[in-house]
Image (cartoon, grey):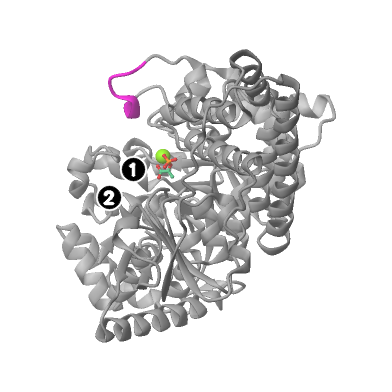
Amino acid sequence: MLSGIGISPGIVLGKAKIKKENNIQIIRESIKDINAEIDRFHEAIECSKRQIKEVRDKTLAEIGEEEARIFDAHELILEDVTFTDQVINKIKNCLINSESAIKEVSNDFITIFNNMNDVYMKEKASDIKDVSERVIYNLLGIEQCDFNSMTEEVIVVSKDLTPSDTASFNKDKVLGFITELGGKTSHTAILARTLEIPAVTGINDLLQKIEDGDFLIIDGNSGQVIVNPNNKVIREYEKKKSEYEKQLLVYKKYKDKKTVSKDGINVELVANIGMPSDIKSVLNNGAEGIGLYRTEFLFMERDKLPTEEEQFQAYKEVVEKMDNKPVVLRTIDIGGDKEVPYLGLPAEMNPFLGYRAIRMCLDRQDIFRTQLRALLRASSYGNLKIMFPMISNIDEIQEAKKILEEIKVDFKNNEILFNENIEIGMMIEIPSAAIMSDVFAKEVNFFSIGSNDLIQYTVAVDRGNDKIANLYDEFNPAVLRLIDTIIKNAHKEGIWVGMCGEAASNSELIPILLAMGLDEFSMNASFLLQARYLISQLSVNDIKQELPQILQMKKGKQIQNFISKITNIKNFKRDMEDYYD
Ligand SMILES: C=C(OP(=O)(O)O)C(=O)O
Ligand SMILES: [Mg+2]
């Protein structure tokens, strides 16, 4: 049994097919005819572009537009003169062959991007590796491994797989794959999930542990790989596989349904997103809207502030793609663990208690006003709602609303279109706001409970600190009492209340939140169908009867046990975590 990281869910059983490393030796040869060498390089670039276009078109036809964009990025690398000029200069100045020049230049770029210690930059490094290997193969006239023409069903085993490799898989033949390198957020992992090919990564010395033809079981849910299992284990996994697939079919049936409990209570089930490209999976998983659009991601991974126009285009794209379904756009929550280096903000002793979110926006009104203008403009293209994060006192929400009003007046004077009745909401994620939620409820049209922060501030536990993760508990009775207070206060004022922190997708908490009367549940798209299924199995009024008793319990564990006993959802929780964690 080998343990790795499951990057694409599902279970498969089959024969191993090792993708041999093309251990090509690139020899640094001296050249005499510079022009001929540069021509050779250009020819290889053109040939690579043609191949990338083919992979792109295949991806577009068989997988999707978003995935095809990975290969647009590959083409851009070949068109990027900072890359190609450096290779040409190396050929000219060092009088070396193209293969070595590309290897040296791409290695420099890969090292720089990998050292940035940033997921996005690391992905860029792997794109450069993919593209430069392709050009080198073309220079050397080496055929690349053709996954498209596999004739028997296999599980591909490889040190690494590029997005090009993954996109060229013949889905009928490649049952799954295992690699040594790669992560959950890599392009290869994204493609595997879209293709619904189970995959596991992160197994050290993989190629020393598996041989061509070995019989394998891959469990993409738990990240386990079993090599040459006995018949008993094979039968056990065949059963697991069929149960998993049956359950998945049940979930999929809920895609276009409303979210209604067994006893007829209707709630809204919506998704959290970070950027427009997340929408595809949101729609595929039957979201009724977006409950949290974390716009700060548009401000990260770049070297200057996005302009009003750039922001407008992004927000408009989201709103239009959601086609009149509600989209709660949260103004930037920069700070805490979300750093934006080009803003030059000084380091702080306690960043989570510091210059963050609305605090920064009310201080840097240039940034805030630009965002408000962009989102107000986008509001005329669909059902957009505005939400302010990290509100801790009444002045902040009033000040934010005042600034928004000023921009509305300016828009009216200048005949700029926007939705005059746009709903305004606030996150309740700081205990002071939760305690004063009766007062805040008079200021806004809705609340969204940010349980990630609300928990960390209520129990004084850093949400990212593994050492004290046992204290970070959504079932902590203090947290549950605060949530109950917030919902009651919102309803007294006649406003709706949602939750967009991770706790909204916790299968043992969902029954309690339903009983408290939460109106909207916002979560990662991959949890939506399971949550809708779970809700359809629950009788909210029965759980409501138990709520006073639950709120009197002294320990989180006690509450959790009680809920799993009365709702019988222990197995369901295990399902959720196995499949998507
Ligand atoms: C949704 C939340 O906001 P973020 O995770 O972006 O801080 C939260 O705090 O629960
Ligand atoms: Mg938060």
Q: Residue at x 27, y 77 (%)?
A: 229
The alpha-carbon separation of the residues under discs 2 and 1 comes to 8 Å
Residue 46 lies, with reference to residue 21, above or below; the image says: above
Type of the residue with mark 1: Leu
Q: Is mark 2 on a helix, strand or loop?
A: helix
Q: Mark 2 points at which residue?
A: 479
Q: Residue 396 carries which label?
A: none
User: Which quadrant contains ligand 2?
Assistant: top left
* Relative to 431, 580 lies left or right: right
Q: How far across and down, in percent of the image, does residue 41 sit?
A: 70, 31
Query: Which of disc 1 and disc 2 is earlier in sequence?
Result: 1
Classify residue 158 as left or right of residue 494: left
x and y percentages locating residue 366 in the rendered image: 61, 17
Dot 1 falls on a residue whose secondary structure is helix
Is there CB contact under 8 Å for labels 2 and 1?
Answer: yes
Quarter of the rendering occupied by the C terminus: bottom left
Q: Looking at the rendered structure, which numbered label has been put on residue 454?
A: 1
**Towards the viewer: 32 or 581:** 32
Residues 479 and 52: in front is 52
Residue at 48% x, 61% y: name it.
526
Magenta-colored span: 347-353
Give the residue type at disc 2.
Val
Q: In this orientation, does residue 395 appear?
A: no
